[in-house]
């Protein structure tokens, strides 16, 4: 690991100003992803600014019935919070499906959102990777493809976003609050992460120096039920091949409202807007779920090594919605 400087910031404006001034500086939260990548020399910041005591580690009620989650809230605290478990079970389930107890104790809400892809070539500095070294090529196009994207990928990058939590937050219409050099801004979670296009080195729409301060959840619909399902190669300690976060509300046998997001299939949490539009007002039946899942995946473009993800994503969507249907009946 290369030598680096370490600072603990006391005030947000000073931390942001330092990061904006220093191109090779990075925020440090739990360090469970950043420090690993520094050890591998995938990233080599000269200065780390510790933000764990800078942003809130509390979960607070919002006046509208939603919740405000400070960026420093550990993943384990968020998963265990009674309000989250009762009102947003999909979020608690997604968090508990990720990493391990020890890692979740250290990992934070802000850091979880900005964890980098698990593409093996991104993590191996001896191989070409457009995300790590723009213009060097994409080793995955002719290489290991099992974990790669089937939706929204580009010839420049076929990597997937690894966070389970972010998939649940995408389905919940969460909003991320960010402080930058100019002002605070609010970014819908679904607009935080990018598709790779021809600039895969940029995972998100954040500018260098912008600090995530919190994630806000809108109030849940009283009649809706939510759930997270993750399919992976091992029962624990593995990233999603495919995951589904879904919330369903049914009235008189018809879908009153539905929210679905997919993980493991794209460079960002994939909000299934096509399926949602087909389902709203449709009969709440297996047939409707099958048709909607097929329509959502119709635009999928598999690589030679990951075509299995398309039926897997379709079936996981249908299975998750059927489980929710049992709950709301
Ligand atoms: C063995 C292992 C298994 C794992 N399995 C899973 C899994 O199954 N599912 C899953 O979702 N995750 C998994 N993870 C990833 C884990 O969830 C992340 O490492 C963790 O959430 C990152 O949070 P952190 O606070 O440690 O972030 P850090 O490592 O400190 O930071 C990550 C990134 O976020 C930036 N950052 C941190 N806080 C802020 C902020 N407030 N504002 C702006 N930028 C910020 C940092 O600069 C860095 O770029 C696994 C990790 C390991 C090591
Ligand atoms: S898929 Fe993306 S992250 Fe992986 S090697 Fe290609 S460019 Fe790099």
Image (cartoon, rainbow, N blue to C red):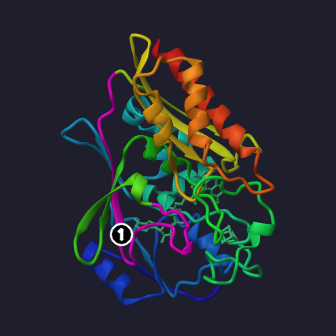
* Image vertical order of residue 47 relative to residue 216, above or below: below
Label 1 SS: strand
- Tell which of 105 and 305 is nearer to you: 305
Q: Is mark 1 within 8 Å of ligand 1?
A: yes
Q: For residue 61, which quarter of the picture?
A: top left
Residue 112 place in picture, x, y as percent: 50, 57
Numbered disc total: 1
Q: Is residue 323 magenta?
A: no
Give the percent coordinates (x, y) of residue 304: 80, 56
| Picture quarter with ligand 1 | bottom right
Q: Is residue 226 above or below residue 20?
A: above
Left or right relative to 291: residue 172: left
What is the x, y in percent for residue 113? 48, 58
* Magenta portion: prevailing SS class: loop
Is residue 170 at all visible to an observer of this figure?
yes
Residue that badge 1 annotates: 211
Query: Is 195 within the magenta?
Result: yes
Residue drawn at the location 61% of the way across and 66% of the way down:
154
Task: Please identify the quadrant where the N terminus is shown.
Answer: bottom right
Where on the picture, by quarter, is residue 181?
Answer: bottom left
Q: Which residues are magenta?
A: 193-222
Residue 320 shows up from this direction = no
User: Residue drawn at (67%, 53%), measured in percent from left and top?
Assistant: 301
Residue at point 65%, 62% (across, down): 159
Return the residue nearer the eye: 265 or 219.
Answer: 265
Q: In the image, residue 17 lies at what x, y percent?
A: 30, 83
Dot 1, how many residues are within 10 Å of its Cα: few (below 14), some (14-19), or many (20+)? many
Please give left or right for residue 246 compared with residue 14 in the image.
right
Residue at the image point whose x is 63% and y is 84% from the top: 135
């Amino acid at each position: 690991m290369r030598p680096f400087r370490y600072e603990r910031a006391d005030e947000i404006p000073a931390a942001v100003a330092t990061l904006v001034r220093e191109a090779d500086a990075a925020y440090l939260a739990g360090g469970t992803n950043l420090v690993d990548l520094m050890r591998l020399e995938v990233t080599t910041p000269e200065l780390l600014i510790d933000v764990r005591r800078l942003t809130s580690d509390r979960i607070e009620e919002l006046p509208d019935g939603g919740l405000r989650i400070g960026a420093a809230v550990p993943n384990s605290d968020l998963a265990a919070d009674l309000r989250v478990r009762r009102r947003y079970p999909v979020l608690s389930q997604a968090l508990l499906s990720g990493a391990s107890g020890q890692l979740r104790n250290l990992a934070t809400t802000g850091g979880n959102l900005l964890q980098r892809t698990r593409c093996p070539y991104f993590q191996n500095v001896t191989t070409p990777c457009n995300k790590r070294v723009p213009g060097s090529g994409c080793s995955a196009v002719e290489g290991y493809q099992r974990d790669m994207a089937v939706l929204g990928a580009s010839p420049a990058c076929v990597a997937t976003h690894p966070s389970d939590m972010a998939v649940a937050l995408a389905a919940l219409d969460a909003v991320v609050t960010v402080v930058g050099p100019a002002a605070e801004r609010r970014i819908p979670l679904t607009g935080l992460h990018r598709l790779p296009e021809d600039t895969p080195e940029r995972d998100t729409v954040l500018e260098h120096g912008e600090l995530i301060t919190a994630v806000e959840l809108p109030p849940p619909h009283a009649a809706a039920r939510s759930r997270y399902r993750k399919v992976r190669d091992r029962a624990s300690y593995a990233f999603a091949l495919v995951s589904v976060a879904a919330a369903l509300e049914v009235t008189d046998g018809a879908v009153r409202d539905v929210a679905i997001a997919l993980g493991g299939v794209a460079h960002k949490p994939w909000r299934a807007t096509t399926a949602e539009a087909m389902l709203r007002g449709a009969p709440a039946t297996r047939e409707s779920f099958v048709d909607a899942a097929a329509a959502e995946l119709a635009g999928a473009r598999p690589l030679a090594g990951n075509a299995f993800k398309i039926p897997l994503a379709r079936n996981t969507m249908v299975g998750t919605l059927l489980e929710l249907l049992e709950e709301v009946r």
